[in-house]
Image: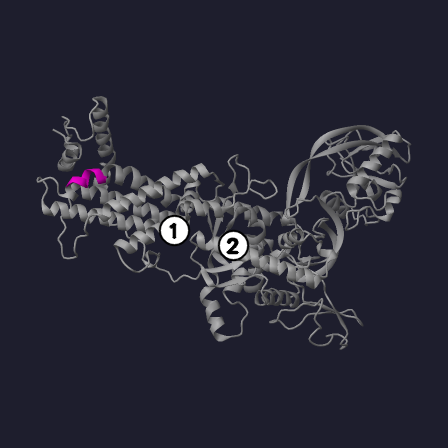
Amino acid sequence: MLGFETYFPIGIDRNGIPVENYTEKKHNIRMHETPREKFIELARVALDDLEAEMIGIMKSMGMSGDFDNYYRTDSDSYRALTQATFIQLWKKGMIYEATRPNNYCTDCRTTVADADIEYEELPSQLVYVKWKVKETNEEIVIATTRPELIVACQVVIVNPNDDRHKHLIDQHAVTPIYRKEVPIVAHTAASPEYGTGIVMVCTYGDYDDVRVLRELQIKTETIALNTDAKMTSAAGKYAGLRAAHARKEITNDLESMGLVVRKDDILHRTPICDRSHTPIEIIPMKEFYLKQVDQKKKLLQLQKQIKFHPEMHRQLLVNWINSVTIDWPISRRRYYGTEIPIWYCTNCRNANVPAPGKYYQPWKDKFPGKCSKCGRHSLRGETRTFDTWFDSSISPLFISKFGSSKNEDKQFFAKTYPTSVRPQAKDIIRTWLYYTLLRSHLLTGKVPWQHAWIMGYGVDEKGERMSKSKGNVIDPIPLLDKYGADIFRFWNVSEASLGFDIRCSEQRMLAAGKFVTKFWNIARFISSFPQPKQNDKIKLTPSDKWILAELAKLTDECMKGYNDFNFFIPATKIREFAWNTFAAHYLEMAKTRAYGQNKNFSRDEQLAAWFTLHHCLRVLNLLLAPIAPFLTEVIWQKLYGEESIHKQEFPQAEFKSSAMASLTQKLVDFNSQVWDEKKKKNLSLKDPLKLKISAELKQFEKDLVAMHNLQ
């Protein structure tokens, strides 16, 4: 409707941990206990059912994308492109493998990137434990929420500015139970306000531990937990216990040994996997990494080329880029995802990648060739998959046919990339938006889109974010069946300005429904009048010029909102104009003239009313069409043309007049005064009333007299 050639592909995301979790729950199975091929097939069938429902909802809501050619992120063609981009970056030296401490979800049983972690204040217990100093036999007290990690303590730190503990520096602490001697050193990471100001640093309690051990160049000697979140053999009699169980047992033993001074119940800021809501552990894992730290400066420059809607959400991206301190771990130990296309030579252990362009499954496919280093044909395929964001981050490349060797595809890519707009919610700026920017930059040297269109959350009536785990999610299907898409859409865009959270309430939908009904009734009323013919000469009255001036102002305001992708502006402006100005005042002023019931009005004045009524309705329909597509389509095709309203161009602001628009409030005040006077005198609206019309409203006298039956 803005006059552009528009390409709107629809994509269905069918990768990631939620897919696997859904399959496990539906079939009451565990992924790692099910044959891989069988699990993949079960997941695919489960997704087909969900996909059909999702497509149905999209169509019911009135989305206008290309549903005949929608794509899936688990299709062979999509996964082939994901693998091709990996191979390209691998050959550029942008990807490497290393063993490092990583976020690990014990429920999902895979590495988790920093961007996929949320933090929650969870109930915990701060246990104050007695330790000994080797050199002096002095008793010191260390407070910890993770006593099960004492076995993995590598160093004890105190703040160099904490006078209470300066004397301990360069001595050794002896761990309770395990009697291991660890150095006591000065480090600012020890907060004098936390616990006793003496902190044990373990492998690994949190990323502060990781950072301190790196800075002090202390090698990892003991790991407390394995990938099942169970204590390792280093824990002695606690080996094999889950972390929570071991925490309880060790605390009990410390108490029986008289080593617990006290226990405080606290709320502890805990890292949580945003998929399973399981507390994260930090475990050394061998993973593939994509270089991102050395790209931060360039990404901060590139983000300036993107226009954010609203601008305030740009800072979320900037903050995230600035916070990146490690490269992106892109490998996962999952089943339903795009496989990493690597085969290892069983002879020389060389890692081999195939030619790009085909979808590979190394865990079951043979390598298409021989080892590039020793020439042997015996190769073992990689079993890991990519992080789901490694897939999702190529969506603008996939839809623009990046990497194709066909001439027509190359021309298509040149025409469609960078794409125009990325619509998404604010919570995945640090994941989907950031990773897409990173990958597109590394592969094309360009930003992936010109505009980032950022939504808020859907929250419940209490203002809490909706989630299935909280049980406060609203199913849209019954609401669409009950109210229809137009009411659902108008409620959605009327609820909050772009970028802010939307409070979901059925009562609010009822209010939106009242406007949709009002608009339909306005259209029915206007449809009772004929439309002037093209050769009719229209002589507008002052009342017509006034409402058309207001309509021109509305058009400019709506277009300003649409050009900023902010549908809240046209929705609220159209409702205000249609209900409180056009229907409440102009329709009442022009009604008598349009019906031709008063001999004081000429044929020309009646024609002018017909023209103005239909012109206003035509423009209002065009302005409202993107928000209420079904309602406006019916009105348009019944009254104004057989071609879809959505193939028309937006209207231009005609009949502008600041002089006329300046009289709006005076007209509204005058009409309100008349209605108030009649109410005070117990008169009906049709009863006559003596009232003087001011000089500045004199030009509207004929319509006002007829409207109010003024004497």
Residue type at mark 1? Asn
The number of callouts visible is: 2
Residue type at mark 2? Met
Q: Marks 1 and 2: which is nearer the front?
A: 2
Q: Are marks 1 and 2 in contact (CB under 8 Å)?
A: no
The label on residue 54 is 2
| Residue 577, percent from left and from top | 30, 41
Disc 2 element: helix
Q: Quadrant of residue 120?
A: top right
Which residue occupies the extreme top position in the image?
A: 681
| Vertical arrangement, residue 375 with respect to residue 303, above or below | below
| Residue 97, percent from left and from top | 72, 60
Please give left or right for residue 481 compared with residue 353 in the image: left
Quadrant location, the N terminus: bottom left
Please give left or right for residue 504 compared with residue 138 in the image: left
Magenta-colored segment: predominant secondary structure: helix
Q: Residue at x 39, y 38 (%)?
A: 511
Disc 1 element: helix
| Residue 421, percent from left and from top | 46, 56
Q: Callout 1 environment at 10 Å: few (<14), some (14 to 19), or many (20+)?
A: few
Extent of the magenta region: 586-592
Q: Which badge, 1 or 2, comes first in the chain's sequence?
A: 2
| Residue 162 among those drawn in magenta | no
Quadrant location, the C terminus: top left
Q: Residue at x 87, y 36 (%)?
A: 176
The residues tagged by marks 1 and 2 sit, at their Cα atoms, a distance apart of 28 Å
Please name the residue that numbered disc 1 is placed on.
Answer: 563
Q: Callout 2 environment at 10 Å: few (<14), some (14 to 19), or many (20+)?
A: few
Please say which color scheme the image uses: one colour
Q: Residue at x 30, y 42 (%)?
A: 578
Residue 451 visible, this orientation? no
Q: Quadrant of residue 31?
A: bottom right
